[in-house]
Amino acid sequence: MINHKIKDRLVLKSVGLEHLDQFVRLQRYVFQVTDEELQKSGYEDGELVRSKKPMLERANVFGWFDGPNLVSQVCTYPCEANIHGRVFNMGGLTGVGTYPEYAGMGLMNSLIRKALVKMREQEQWVSYLYPYSIPYYRRKGWEIMSDHLTFTIKDSQIPKPVEVPGFVERMSVEHPDVIETYDRFARQTHGALIRNKLDWEEYWRWENEDERTAAVYYKDPHEPAGYIMYWIEDDIFHIKEMIYLDQETRHGLWNFVNAHFSMIDEVRGHVYKNEPIAFYMEDSQIVETIEPYFMARIVDLPAFLKNFPFIDFYLPFHFIVSDPLADWNNGIFSVTGMRDGENIVGREPAGRPVRLDIGTLTSMLMNYRRASYFYDLERLKTDRDTLILLENIIPSQQPYFSDYF
């Protein structure tokens, strides 16, 4: 039962730098971050608090206060993400937490609504988050948009060397060629975060980058085309992330891994999209696990639809959408053609209807799953001709997202 006497004395307001210590304490409590974990990540006394200051300066943070005490909070980073080749402003939702004695009062529901309103005002038309509870965020309108695949291969299963014209150099993970290579990759990879300096700092937030090395593949002395972030420990070659712009680079990077054959017993790595790597291996009997990773939700549906890069649009249709938190996304949204590089979006029916919720629509447009998949699950209702239309006009590239916030 909600304690109304407690809730009535609470105040919702912005969280500023003057609340930095409280902001970090609440995060540490909710996510159970211990001093030992901080030390393993390379943090010294007080460094975590100082590291959060730039984030708090650029983010929108809202909280409920009980007198001077911050008791519930939500934070959104201003980010950019590549969605099917077009860069969108994206609100990265994070720092979500409430002290347990204030749970069950609907505090987080109101904070997330407030965050969505602010994201819409700032033209962040889509939002990403890492879910600590998928059912919870589904009820708020987010849906799965990317996967995290882990794999383990024995030393004997490492791909055999393939002759390539380029070469690999080892260097710091902060080297300009590493940053440039990721930026080129992200700008041609659907779903990826366009990282700025602070995004790179967040990328290493819970890891000690001093223990990581970057192996960069060069197609010629001046053209980096991919890299591996890796470390070696206990005779295991750990791959944090491998990115490449073409297949030559993929071969070159695996050649580098193979060069460690005599030093290691196995390779353990990560892939951040639904792309099992077993097919690349001569011996495909490797261990792979796959799990949902990030979730996304459309914040401002009319604006998002106007800018979404549909392919070969040829028939009008309309979505009938339900959204549990963002009232402006409820109702009819027709897409009838293009004008001046934007889709024509209206609020009156046009063509055949497609009925679905905001989470399903987000996951479908992100191409985590195709329209026919949601149709078979009865999460999307339409006729067969319109289903085929959706299959044809939504780009087919799998989303990739390797960051964490």
Image (tube, rainbow, N blue to C red):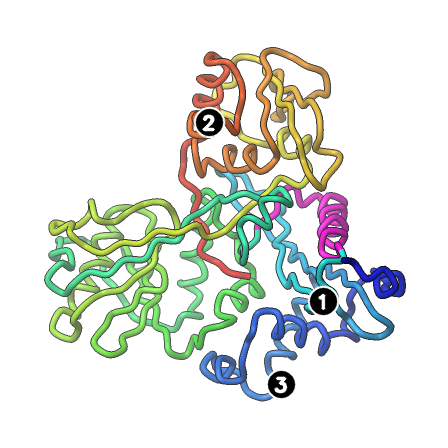
Q: Quadrant location of the C terminus?
A: bottom right
Q: Which residue is mark 2?
A: 371
Residue at 17% over, 73% down: 264
Q: Residues within 10 Å of mark 2 (few under 14, many from 20)?
A: many
83 relative to 28 in the view: left or right: left
Q: Earlier in the sequence, mark 2 or mark 1?
A: 1
Image spot of residue 68 (x, y percent): 85, 75
Q: Quadrant of the N terminus?
A: bottom right
Q: Which residues are magenta?
A: 106-128
Whole-percent x, y for residue 86 in the image: 54, 38
- Name the residue furthest front: 1
In the rendered structure, the answer to whether residue 65 lies left or right of residue 284 reads right
Q: How many marks?
A: 3
Say whether disc 2 or disc 3 marks the residue closer to the N-terminus.
3
Q: Amino acid at mark 1?
A: Glu
Q: Secondary structure at mark 1?
A: helix
**Inter-mark Cα distance, 2 to 3:** 48 Å
Q: Quick check: 345 left or right of 172? A: right
Front-most of 393 and 380? 380
Percent coordinates x, y for residue 332 in the rendering:
69, 22
Question: Which residue in the structure is indicated by mark 1?
Answer: 57
The residue furthest bottom is: 45
For marks 1 and 3, the one nearer the N-term is 3
Where residue 46 is drawn, which disc sits there?
3
Q: Is residue 88 toward the left or the right of residue 324 in the image?
A: left
Quarter holding residue 349: top right
* 209 is within the stretch colored magenta: no
Q: Main secondary structure of the magenta part?
A: helix
Instruction: Please tell me whether residue 293 is drawn above or below residue 230 in the rendered image.
Output: above
Give the Cα separation between the discs numbered 2 and 1: 40 Å
